Amino acid sequence: MDDSPKLTARQQQILDLVRDAIERTGAPPTRAEIATELGFRSANAAEEHLQALARKGVIELVGGTSRGIRLKSDTLRAVNIARDARAAFSKQFSLPMAGLAQLTLPLVGRVAAGHPILATEHIEQTYTLDASMFSSPPDFLLTVRGMSMSGVGIMDGDLLAVRKASEARTGQIVVARIGDEVTVKRFKRGRTGIELLAENPDFAPIQIANGDESFSLEGLAVGLIRKQMFS
């Protein structure tokens, strides 16, 4: 039996838009961006559709943030499985065994200065997760520290799924190392250097000059899960 939520065509369109935005930039769209993309007259119309999706259990809305939209992990798996099943059927292929879609990911704790982020001493434990939870396969999980990214629903204690990368595009959410610190921020490249932007007005941008050897990019955010899932 198909247990995936029954969505209207418009609700499915908005869900797809949210998922696409997360895949491209690592963050969900604002209500205004949804309204502009779909031709609504106001952000209120987008909000009404988001509330309907939340009632159906497809997404979770985080209050007080302009990008406070989270895909529910169980619903995301159901949607992806249904999508993959349709694609597989159309190609007359069978779905792979569920075990083949599992990822075993290390959870990185405090990172020592000068050591690779995936050094053995940094690994607190490992988790086995469904690959369909993520926009692209991650290499590790990182515990979020602090509330600097609360505006996009990334909260203290959440687990950020990260794909290793040494380059990023403006607008992507990244994990960066600055000296002895590892931080999660939105990436912005300028002519004179890089800005690491918080999604919380209480936190100032971090300026990185071109050639600053204390800066390195560790990876790109490709998913977010709550640590309570494993409690």
Image (cartoon, rainbow, N blue to C red):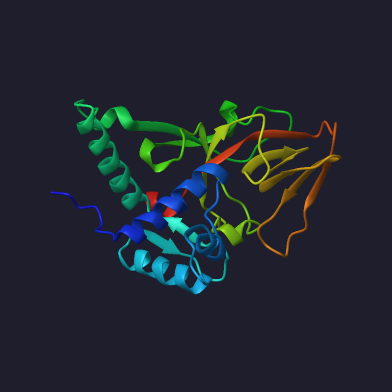
Q: Is residue 106 above or below residue 156?
A: above
Q: Quarter of the image holding residue 7? A: bottom left
Report whether 35 appears left or right of 11.
Answer: right
Estimate the x, y position of residue 123 in percent, counting from the top left.
54, 33
Does residue 213 show up?
yes
Total residue callouts: 0
Report whether 191 appears left or right of 84.
Answer: right
Q: Is residue 14 above or below residue 50?
A: above
Q: Residue at x 73, y 29 (%)?
A: 114
Estimate the x, y position of residue 107 in percent, counting from the top left.
51, 38
Q: Residue at x 19, y 26 (%)?
A: 92
Estimate the x, y position of residue 13 in percent, counting from the top left.
38, 55
Estimate the x, y position of residue 152 in percent, counting from the top left.
57, 58
Q: Nearer the viewer, residue 1 or 46?
A: 46
Q: Nearer the viewer, residue 14 or 169?
A: 14
Q: Residue at x 53, y 65 (%)?
A: 31
Report whether 140 appears left or right of 95.
Answer: right
Does residue 130 show up?
no
Report whether 103 appears left or right of 200.
Answer: left
Looking at this view, name the residue that lies furthest to the left.
Answer: 1
